[in-house]
Image (cartoon, coloured by chain):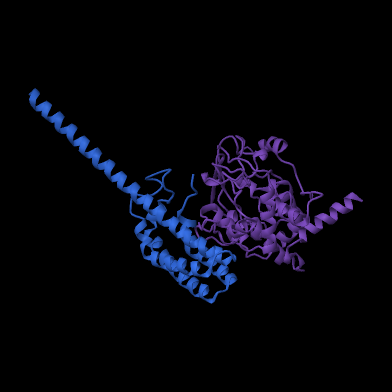
């Protein structure tokens, strides 16, 4: 009787440790994904900055051209940055992606396509070499493209 | 003599740097002011595709949930029966057409700074909007704040009616920026911490509010180099207000995005004026830091 209780206890203990290990492992994986997403967005920001600098007469055209190509290349990967279970509700204080992004998934996943249209237009405008026009198109892309997601699905950082 | 000068300066502020002020059309001037003042943010339920100015989505505060009223010229449920004098009293004194004190969720505490001409222009613009006979949702106010007469005490402690007087010795651009920031765009109302009675802690003006509208954090926009926007140039501030893009290429979201819908319509001269004023406020460490 005692032996089976001991074995049951050991079994339960082992299961608990294994499970917590799995849970912690999954949590760590998700944190890794969140960090990767944040790094991805920082890279987006760097490219936007390069274009913004050019539009204000500060940066150079070549940098702006490379930046917009980077943005276009990165666009198909945007959707992959948002796996399930990585919202601000899942990881408060670590990420600021609203859970609505996932409940509205059918709508949200279409936004990168709208952004791509803006990014391609931006590429054309940069090619003309007119910083003022670039500023205008960057603004439009910011509002209709980046803004479409950020306005609806991003909380302010705390 | 000083009064005449002050009046002249006041007039100058209303027109300085603003192309639209040369418009002879009060409705066009009103439209511009409505963009700057961000009326649609609270009075249009954009989230649910509500008609313009027919009443807003919920605004959650520590005192309850408030809903922006219907300010279309609908005679029932809107402001169709309001006289211009009543409209003035609402923005200048925070009193509605039933002679009730209004909750300072409506930032009359800032709008009180506006000139009579600007308030009239806003009224003219709103009168041209499509009347929507739809009652806005009722506020859901926590006990005991739904007892409006308590506002008498709040107002005594915390409210000074305007209008905003120009500051002598400062140039027209700075004064224009101050007018737009303090009286119209009312930046302080989100970016300043509030005390336990919900009044602005004005000696921490613009230092940020970790518990802003809808519980969102509003950042420090004083020129503090570490916790504020001290490293931002005038062009950087203009950039954010114009298209929501920050100096590090980020795109502002949530509450500020709504603001940019309005400020994005302002002239470059007015945006420069706003940025000039914001760069001049006392640098403070972010609230709570």
Q: Residue drawn 70% across and 67% down? A: B28
Q: Position of residue B78 (x, y in %)?
A: 64, 57
Residue B104 higher or lower than B253, as above or below: above
The image quadrant where one finds the C terminus of chain B is top right
Q: Residue drawn 63% across and 45% down? A: B206
Q: Nearer the viewer, residue B236 or A151?
A: B236
Q: Residue furthest top?
A: A2
Residue B265 higher or lower than A28, as above or below: below
Classify residue B114 as left or right of residue A97: right
Residue A43 higher or lower than A57, as above or below: above
- Total marks shown come to 0
Residue A135 higher or lower than A86, as above or below: below
Q: Which chain is purple?
A: B
Q: Residue drawn 35% across and 47% down? A: A31
Q: Position of residue A40 (x, y in %)?
A: 40, 56
Q: Which chain is blue?
A: A
Q: Nearer the viewer, residue B237 or B257?
A: B237
Q: Residue furthest bottom?
A: A128
Residue B88 appears in the rendering: yes
Residue A114 appears in the rendering: no
Q: Residue drawn 47% across and 62% down? A: A47
Q: Nearer the viewer, residue B210 or B72?
A: B210
Q: Quadrant of residue A79?
A: bottom left
Q: Residue furthest right?
A: B1
Q: Position of residue B203 (x, y in %)?
A: 67, 38
Q: Quadrant of residue B15?
A: bottom right
């Amino acid at each position: 009787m005692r032996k089976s209780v001991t074995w049951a206890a050991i079994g339960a203990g082992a299961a608990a440790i294994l499970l917590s290990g799995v849970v912690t492992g999954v949590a760590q994986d998700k944190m890794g994904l969140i960090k990767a997403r944040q790094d991805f967005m920082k890279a987006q920001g760097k490219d936007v900055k390069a274009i913004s600098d050019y539009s204000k007469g500060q940066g150079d055209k070549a940098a702006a051209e490379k930046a917009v190509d980077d943005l276009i290349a990165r666009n198909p990967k945007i959707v992959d940055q948002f796996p399930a279970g990585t919202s601000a509700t899942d990881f408060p204080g670590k990420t600021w992606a609203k859970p609505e992004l996932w409940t509205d998934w059918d709508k949200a996943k279409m936004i990168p396509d709208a952004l791509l249209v803006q990014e391609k237009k931006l590429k054309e405008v940069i090619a003309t070499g007119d910083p003022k026009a670039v500023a205008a198109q960057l603004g439009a892309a910011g509002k209709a493209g980046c803004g479409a997601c950020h306005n609806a699905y991003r909380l302010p950082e705390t | 003599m000083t009064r005449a000068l002050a009046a002249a300066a006041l007039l100058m502020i209303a027109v300085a740097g603003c192309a639209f002020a040369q418009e002879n059309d009060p409705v066009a001037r009103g439209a511009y002011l409505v963009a700057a003042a961000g009326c649609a943010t609270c009075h249009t339920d954009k989230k649910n595709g509500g008609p313009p100015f027919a009443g807003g989505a919920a605004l959650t505060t520590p005192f309850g949930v408030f809903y922006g009223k219907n300010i279309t010229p609908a005679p029932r449920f809107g402001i169709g029966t309001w006289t211009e004098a009543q409209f003035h009293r609402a923005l200048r004194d925070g009193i509605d057409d039933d002679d009730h004190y209004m909750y300072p969720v409506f930032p009359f505490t800032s709008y009180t700074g506006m000139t009579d001409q600007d308030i009239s222009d806003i009224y003219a613009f709103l009168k041209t909007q499509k009347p929507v006979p739809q009652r806005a949702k009722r506020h859901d106010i926590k006990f005991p704040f739904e007892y409006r007469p308590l506002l008498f005490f709040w107002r005594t402690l915390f409210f000074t009616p305007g209008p905003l007087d120009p500051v002598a010795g400062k140039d027209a651009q700075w004064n224009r920026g101050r007018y737009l920031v303090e009286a119209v765009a009312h930046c302080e109302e989100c970016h300043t911490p509030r005390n336990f009675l919900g009044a602005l802690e004005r000696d921490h003006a613009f230092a940020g509010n970790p518990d802003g509208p809808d519980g969102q954090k509003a950042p420090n926009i004083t020129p503090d180099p570490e916790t504020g926007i001290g490293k931002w140039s005038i062009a950087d501030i203009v950039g954010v207000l114009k298209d929501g893009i920050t100096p590090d290429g980020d795109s502002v979201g949530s509450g500020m995005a709504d603001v940019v819908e309005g400020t994005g319509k302002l002239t470059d001269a007015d945006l420069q004026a706003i940025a000039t004023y914001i760069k001049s406020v006392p640098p403070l460490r972010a609230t709570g830091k």
